[in-house]
Amino acid sequence: MSPEPGNPHEADPEQLELIDLPHLPRSRRTSSKDSPGGPRDGTGHDHTPAYLAGESPVARVLLESHVPHLDRLFDYGVPRDLAEEAQPGTRVRVRFGGQRLQGWLIERTADTEVPRDRLQPLIRVQSGLAVLTPGTLAVARLVAARSAGVVADVLRAAVPPRVASVEKQALKARAAEDKDAGKDAAKDPSEDAAPALEADAAQDLTGDPEKAPAEPLPSGQPGPATSAPVDTRAWERYDNGPEVIGALAAGEPVRAVLQALPSHAEHDRLDLVAVAVAVTHAAGRGAIIVVPDGKMLDRLQERVERLLPDGVVARLHSDDKPTPRYRAFVQLLEGRRTVVLGTRPAVWAPVRDPGLIVVLDDGDGNLIEQRAPYHHARDVALLRAEHEHLAVLIAGQTVTPEAQRLVDTGWARPVRPPRDLLRASMPRIVATSDSWHQQRDSLAGRARLPETAFRVARDALRIGPVLIQVARAGYAPAIACERCRTPARCTACEGPLTVLAHGRQPSCGWCGREAMAWSCPVCHHPRWRMSAVGSQRTAEELGRAFPQVPVIASSGDTIRRSVKAEPALVVATPGAEPWAEGRYAAALLLDGDRMLSRPGLRAEEETLRRWFDAVSLVRAGHDGGTVVVTSEHERAVNTLVRWDPAGHARNELAERRVLQLPPAVRSAALTGELGALHDFLDLAQLPPDVRVIGPAPVEDSDLPGPRGRARRTEAGEQLGDDGMTPGSPGSRAEHRVLLFFGYAMAAEVTARLRSARAEASALRRFGVVQVRCDIADLL
């Protein structure tokens, strides 16, 4: 019976027998008397089929497969008619286990353990461009090793999907340039304008890219800026700022963690990053800047392009259409652009001769890859910086515990504003929880909009817009019984009931069904109340309180990029706050206690990051800027009032070091069926110093990736990933094991986890166990 499409488990035995796994029996090993190039005939000559290329007839291919035990190179024959196209870094199509799979051609060689007359030939070369660079492959392997993942999964995030029309345009433009320059096919490839991967010197992707000879940039490539010197005075006002910017100008791989000033009209964090990029470009090096979302990307792009010559900057945004995204990728690959700005995928951009890599707001969850192996852009940036000897800048309004750890260990130096400059740049921050406001307003601690906040908003509206930050989007994201306060849930699937708009019936947040004629299942009371208020309801209430003032909502699917300097009430959820021209006159930080009470290791850290980001949009105190925070949480409020994100990060890191929690230690989560977890741990044979917690049952909503959303039948029964209801015969109730281990043993632990995944995948003796490393966002 032919294997199922898309099931590489049913692989060709000739290929599977070459998989080298610890403790995995192999049906046949190559005899030591066999030649690496295959069998020999009686005369001692190699028997090479006539269809193979005469030079380097063996292609080593990495399959685009998520199956762990196929995470290795497979040997294929290079037909003569594909010898010119089949170059390292190109996409190819091959036969494997009766299927046609895509893969990456990693290396051309003359040696193989497979008899040459039994080599499967490449079916075709799918791309005329070698889009996988040696550097990208090397960093992908580092990321896969660090995260116990599969290299092909990492490359899926690193190289955008192919757009054939873009490649044709690039090859046509290259041919035209070669013709104009009087080049011919016989010219030395090292002088060609093609990418390094298509030169003979870079034939082997497994080699060290630094040992390959440098190639000239294509014609028309903008060189270093020759305009007026870059103004670096903004950096010189920070502690360690002159040293960092001086190192960038000298091309040195400096490493820094930047805590930017709030509310500074002349140079905020984006201006500082733009200056650092311009200095790097002036030194003749490229730069990579990674931001968490498109809103910040648009603002940063404007500032960077203002300081750089035309035709230098490329944009890589995950939400862009495939054609412009792939075109920007190819331009970077060929060296036609040397600075890239983008969201999460930009960290992999194939910039020629990069000198600086920047990660903005590294605490933002958008920087975590949403597909296996769930790597963080910050971690990729650090690995790439080490491998390629780049300068690193982690910048933001706050300092995460991960970034603070880099400072504490001496790996990076802090760049922070002096206290006097900080105080001059801050807006006035008012905490309604302090004793003075409690005495003046007895309801200040209980009212959602205390009298102080109302008064500040009213006064600020005379000079500009006012930002109101609320915890949740929607109208009433949660409701409960009016009498007994029992949370209202769907009778079909037990999902939470919500109200989407004024006058609408409650509906289920999971299955979407309306709850007609709802009544409490406990006390049978027919009326409900809002137990949580969303941004739409808040906007409605503020509209009644300020009837002559426009109310703008920014949340959910309707996020505003910016607002004008005119008076308006802007209600936004965390992360959806629009940029205001001239900055906001005031900000009201509501629902802080609700945000801080969320379960999770990072609740306080995340709330503070949201607060700091919102406050940074407000004018400085000497320009009339005021912020009101309504939370009762003393430590978080004091951190905001003092504007001490680095101090909070130090304290958090010290506490987690005592408790042996991330990022003081590394972590991993194993998720799967209970029996499979026990078998997997037996197979992995982890070091005794690894702290193992669990297994414990988990719900679908706690799972990462596509399984994180519950699926249900028409009757409301929850489905597992296998399409069965929990508890039914053959169903898979998920459990999770948490692992905590020190950095010194991290390489050994992840190697054992990775090896166990591959062995379990090959032997198929128990169910699938998902492995995810660095899980602070799950705790």
Image: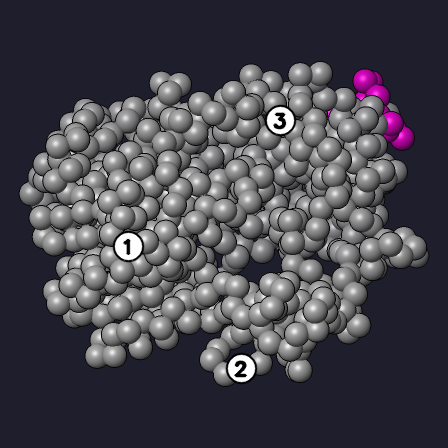
Residue drawn at (66%, 49%) of the image: 703
Q: Where residue 504 is drawn, which disc sits there?
A: 2
The residue mark sitting in front, 2 or 3, is 2
Q: Which mark is residue 441?
A: 1
Q: Amino acid at mark 2?
A: Arg
Please say whether residue 626 is one of the residues in the magenta stretch: no
Nearest the eye: 774 or 550: 550
Instruction: Give the CA distance from mark 2 to mark 1.
Output: 35 Å
Q: Main secondary structure of the magenta part?
A: loop
142 relative to 367, above or below? above
Mark 3 to mark 1 CA distance (whole Å): 47 Å
Q: Residue at x 32, y 36 (%)?
A: 639
Residue 682 coordinates in the image, percent (x, y): 81, 26
Distance from Cα at disc 2 to Cα at disc 3 = 47 Å
N-terminal of the pair, mark 2 or mark 1, is: 1
Q: Amino acid at mark 3?
A: Phe
For mark 2, does the 10 Å Cα neighbourhood hold few (<14), some (14 to 19), or many (20 or more) residues? few
Quadrant assignment for the C terminus: top right
Q: Residues within 10 Å of mark 3 (few under 14, many from 20)?
A: many
Which stretch did the figure color magenta?
A: 25-36
